[in-house]
Image: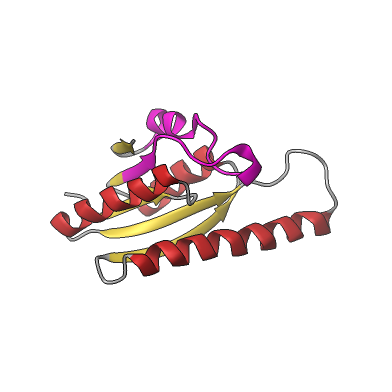
């Protein structure tokens, strides 16, 4: 039923709970999980090298978060780490469409805008534009 599950992940407690819920589903259905973090770029005009610096710094930050999350759940199910850049809602929905996911699992809230991921309304927006069922975990 749910062969491919996308979990939107920003390291917040709700996203950790979303990952745990997805793992339980994946165990039951033999699913593969794609752990997806989205890095937003500054909305203001910056120099090209500043954008590259932000991408590199944020990329390392989210890769470490994902590695810790995957390592702490090692061996439970197959989890693929994915980091993409752009607006969280757009990129998650686009990725879900392009990879034909059966389910998207998100936390009800994420980190603050200072962490550049998951504004409070992202899970709501994903629910409106998702190409597949969505599970919002509290």
Q: Is residue 123 magenta?
A: yes
Picture mark count: 0
Query: Is 55 displayed left or right of 89 in the figure?
Result: right
Q: Residue at x 16, y 49 (%)?
A: 1
Q: Residue at x 82, y 59 (%)?
A: 49
Colour mode of the rendering: secondary structure
Q: Quadrant of residue 54?
A: bottom right
Q: Position of residue 88 (x, y in %)?
A: 53, 42
Whether residue 3 is visible to the viewer of this picture, yes or no, is no
Seen in the picture, residue 33 relative to 1 is either above or below; the reply is below
Q: Which residues are magenta?
A: 104-130
Seen in the picture, residue 97 relative to 121 is either above or below; the reply is below
Q: Quadrant of the C terminus?
A: top left
Residue farthest toward the right in the current orientation of the protein: 47
Q: Position of residue 131 (x, y in %)?
A: 35, 38
Q: Position of residue 96 (x, y in %)?
A: 40, 47
Q: Is residue 121 magenta?
A: yes
Q: Quadrant of residue 123?
A: top left
Whether residue 65 is visible to the viewer of this picture, yes or no, is yes
Query: Is 113 displayed left or right of 118 in the figure?
Result: right
Q: Position of residue 68 (x, y in %)?
A: 44, 65
Residue farthest toward the left in the current orientation of the protein: 28
Q: Residue at x 38, y 50 (%)?
A: 16
């Amino acid at each position: 039923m749910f062969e491919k599950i996308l979990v939107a992940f920003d390291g917040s407690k709700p996203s950790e709970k979303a990952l745990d819920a997805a793992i339980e589903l994946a165990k039951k259905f033999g699913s593969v999980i794609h752990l997806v973090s989205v890095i937003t770029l500054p909305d203001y005009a910056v120099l090209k090298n500043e954008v590259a610096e932000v991408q590199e710094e944020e990329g390392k930050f989210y890769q470490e978060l994902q590695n810790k999350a995957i390592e702490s759940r090692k061996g439970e199910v197959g989890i693929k780490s994915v980091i993409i850049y752009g607006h969280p809602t757009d990129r998650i929905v686009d990725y879900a469409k392009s990879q034909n996911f059966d389910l998207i699992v998100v936390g009800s809230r994420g980190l603050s805008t200072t962490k550049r991921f998951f504004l409070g309304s992202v899970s709501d927006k994903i629910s409106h534009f998702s190409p597949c069922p969505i599970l919002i975990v509290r």
